Structures are given as structure tokens and as C-alpha cells.
Image (cartoon, rainbow, N blue to C red):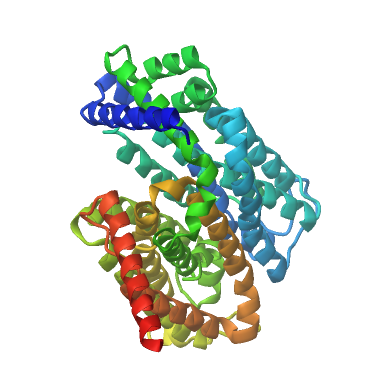
Amino acid sequence: MTVKESALLQTSIEEHQRSEEKMELFVASRHSRLKQLVAGVSATLGCLLNGLVMGYTGPALPSLMNRTETGGTNFLGDEFIVTYQEGSWIAGLVSAGCLTSSLVAGPCMDFFGRRFTLMVVTSLSFLVGLLLILFSTSVFQLYIGRLLNGAGMGFVMSTASVYIIEIGSPDMRGYLGCFIQLMWAAGVLLIYILGCFLNWWQLVIAKLMFIPPFVIGMYISPESPRWLFLNGKLEEGRAALVWLRGETVNNLAEEKCIRTELYLDKSEDSVKLAYFKKPEILKPFLVAIFMMFFRNWSGMPMIIAYCNTILSRSGSTLDASLSSMVVGVVLFISCLSSTFVIAKFSRKSLLVASMIGMAASFACLGVIFLSVDGQSGQNNGVLEKYYLGWLPCATILFLLFIGNLGYGTVVWVVIAEILPKKIRSVGNSIIIFIAYLLGFISTKTFVDLSGLLGESGTFWLYSSVCILGAIYTVLCVPETKGKTLQEIEENFKKQSSQSNQTQSNLEKVDL
């Protein structure tokens, strides 16, 4: 870097710091908050679709396997039944579809824009996938449809969060960010409620009804000003700011802040991958990956995907469809609760308590399934004998509540906090890819593990993973509450420095 470039970079950094200080003082007007709310809700309608897609197999699989009064036929009226093993592919392929789209979403939203990616690419993935499922005459069509629905989920997860961060004012970003998880939980709850009355293909028609509001909402909303400025569309970027903020004197300061930050990011792009070699960067990145491993192998995603099937095979005396609707309510309430408890308790205590609670719940489910015939899936009357027919549903409700309260929600906060700024965007994309890969494997292998170990053995396996996750969290995950991002980053640098010093001392001793 030349002296002139260094001076220009330093000037840009100082200007950026001054702009950030000004922006932190900015409080959105009532008009601006309303406009940001419209854009934020429009984007997170995609997250609602995610919840509908993710929770679909819970109420749909029983009718697909002809275990309900309305099962056994497709939309065209022809006989259509899937096996238990095929059902596991239908549940798992959503995560597989997310793998590809999570890699493609970055270049797609950089080239076409955040708004276009959500409004066109994402909606088409959902639309084509749902139509394939609706008119399925073979299980292969179902597989392709679920893959495309998974692709839509990946586009939403990768794009909606970026869009919200870039359109939100400093005082609104946290609030808008809560809609991502809340809308997902609302989608799961809604599909479970509809599942009490509709069969598998009727549920598909219901999901199709939510695509037009999503498209219309994104059509009304503006493109991200940051993306517009990045692509040299200055007038359109200013117009987007006016739409979001109104005509205010702060718009100029925000524009300068965005454009300066874009310049700084561009100056560092060429060396981002090299940062992963540094211990203070690599360590938090690996901590985040292992946290994601325990989150996806804790068994919670599997419970959501197979909720009705597990309840119907558990010996529960409660109606499976009604129980799954209550499950959706619990997921939604736990998402709401997490926004309150995260302010009162340490991140680490919530994560550890979450894992311990799930471990106990899975251990209990393992005991419950000892009374179930593994071949027929019928219980032998033990639960009824001791008036415990309510226990399977209660155990699953507690598992999902405590799981979603901690590792289901807080883990995303901790990962965002521990990833250093220099690799945050790249690192987050890699972690999302790994999350969906692990989600696919864990969801798909539930049926295989059940066949190999039995349901009881499988649940005890998940319990063991949760115990290991709790131990890992205690030993390796740092507490981030009350610390600035800079303090967290400096703490990892200090640990790396101490580790290098210890290694150096050991080498001297050996000599």
C-alpha cells in the first residue's frame, strides 16, 4: 500500500468513526419506524414461509403414510402413500436444499440485490417447489419439491437478515432482528394448527396462499440503500433512504457512513481468507462451529420435523394433531421469552441450562419408548395403566421450550458476538452452510438410528450429545454478556498470546 493510499485509508477510518458516532445518536421518527416495520415484516414473511416448510412434515407425514382418515390419496385423487423411510427423506431434503442456496445466496444478492433475491428468486423457489409437491404422482417429485423449498429457506436465511441490518436504523435493528425467529416460530405454529384440519396436499395449498403477500410486501419495500450505493446507484440509494427515514438532515450523515464503510470493506476484501490462519480468529470460528454442531445434533430439529409421528408412536393418549398445535404455541412463546431472559441471565447459563434440560427430556422419552413395540409402533398400555398418557406430550413441550429458549435462539446471538468483524460475513456464511448440512444429516438419520438402536436408544443417544454439549459450553464458550465486541475480540487475542507464550516456554524447556 502506498503512502497516499495509507493516508486516504486513515482519513476514511476517522471519517467513518465520526459518522458512526452521529448515527448512534439518531432516533427514528414515528414515520420512519412504521416504514422500517413494513419493510422488515415484508422480508420476514419469508421466515414465516420457512416455518411453514420446516414444520410441514410434522402434520403431513401421518396422512402421507395413510395413517389418518384423509390420507392415502394425492391432489388428483389417485392412490399415493409413502413409507417411513421415504418420509425421512421428505423431512431431511429441506436441509439439503438449503446447502446449495446458502452458498449461492451471497453472490445472488450481491449481483441482483437483496430485494430482488427475496422477491423473485426466493418466492420462485417456494412456488415451484410447492406446485411440484401439490401435483406429485411419485415420491421423486416430492423430493424435488422439498429440495426447492429448502433452497427457498436458504435464500431467506442468508438474505433477510442482511436486508434487515442494512435498512434498520441503529435503534430499530435489534427489534427488527427479533422478527426473524418470531416469524419462523409463527410459521411452525400455523402449520401445526392447519394440520389439525387439513391433509398433506391441502396444507400445500394453504402454504401457497402466503407467497403473494410476501412478493407484494417486497415489491412495496425499497432495495437496501447499502447495496444501491455499493453499485453506484446514488440517486436510488438516496431515494431508498428517504423512503425509510423520511426527509431528515441525518440522511446525509448516514449516506457518508455507509459509503465510507463500503470503502473500508473493499480495502480489506483481498486479505479476509488469510485472517482464518490467525489463532485469535480461528479459535472463535471453531467455537462457533462446535456450538452449531451441538445445536443441530441435540435432536431438537428432529422433534420439530417428526412431532406428530413421535407422539402417535409414543403411547400418548392425547390427540397427536392437537398436541403438535400446542408444540407450535410453545415454540412461539419460547422465542418471545428468549428476548426477555437474555437481558436478565448470562448467555452461558442459558446455553448450559438448555442442554441439561434437553438431556433430561430425551432421557425421559427414552424411558417412555421402552413401552412401545418397535415393529408395530403401538404402545403396550403401560402409560394408560399408570395414568401417564399425558407424559410424552409434556416431555416434548418442555424439551422444545427449554431448547429453543437457549440453544435454539441464544446460540445465534453468541455466534454473532464472538465472530471477529474481519471475518464475520464470510464466517457466518460458512457456519450457515455447516448448520444446514448438520440439520440434513440429523433429520435424515433419525429413522435409520431408530431402526438400528430403537427409539429408546436413539433418544438416549441425543441425551448423551446434549450432556457433551453442556460440558463443551462450560469449558469452551466464553461469556459475552455485558462485553463490547471489541472486548470479546481482545479476550481471544489475549488467550492466543498466552497460549503462544506457554508453547514457547515449553520449547525452551525441551531445549
For the point 37% across and 29% down, the residue is: 7
Residue found at x 26% / y 24%: 28
Q: Is residue 165 above or below residue 224?
A: below
Q: Position of residue 352 (x, y in %)?
A: 31, 71
Q: Position of residue 366 (x, y in %)?
A: 47, 83
Query: x%, y% of residue 180?
Result: 42, 44
How many marks are shown on the rendered structure?
0
Quadrant into which the C terminus falls: bottom left
Q: Is residue 210 left or right of residue 388?
A: right
In this rendering, does residue 335 appear at all? yes
Q: Is residue 311 left or right of residue 391?
A: right
Towards the viewer: 10 or 324: 10
Looking at the picture, how far across and down is residue 476, in whole percent? 35, 71
Foreground pick, 451 / 252: 252
Question: At 74% from the left edge and 51% from the top edge, which residue is drawn?
Answer: 144
Residue drawn where x is 39% and y is 19% of the image: 241
Q: Is residue 156 above or below residue 287?
A: above
Q: Nearer the viewer, residue 295 or 125?
A: 295
Q: Is residue 460 above or below residue 484?
A: below
Whether residue 499 sits left or right of residue 69 in the image: it is left
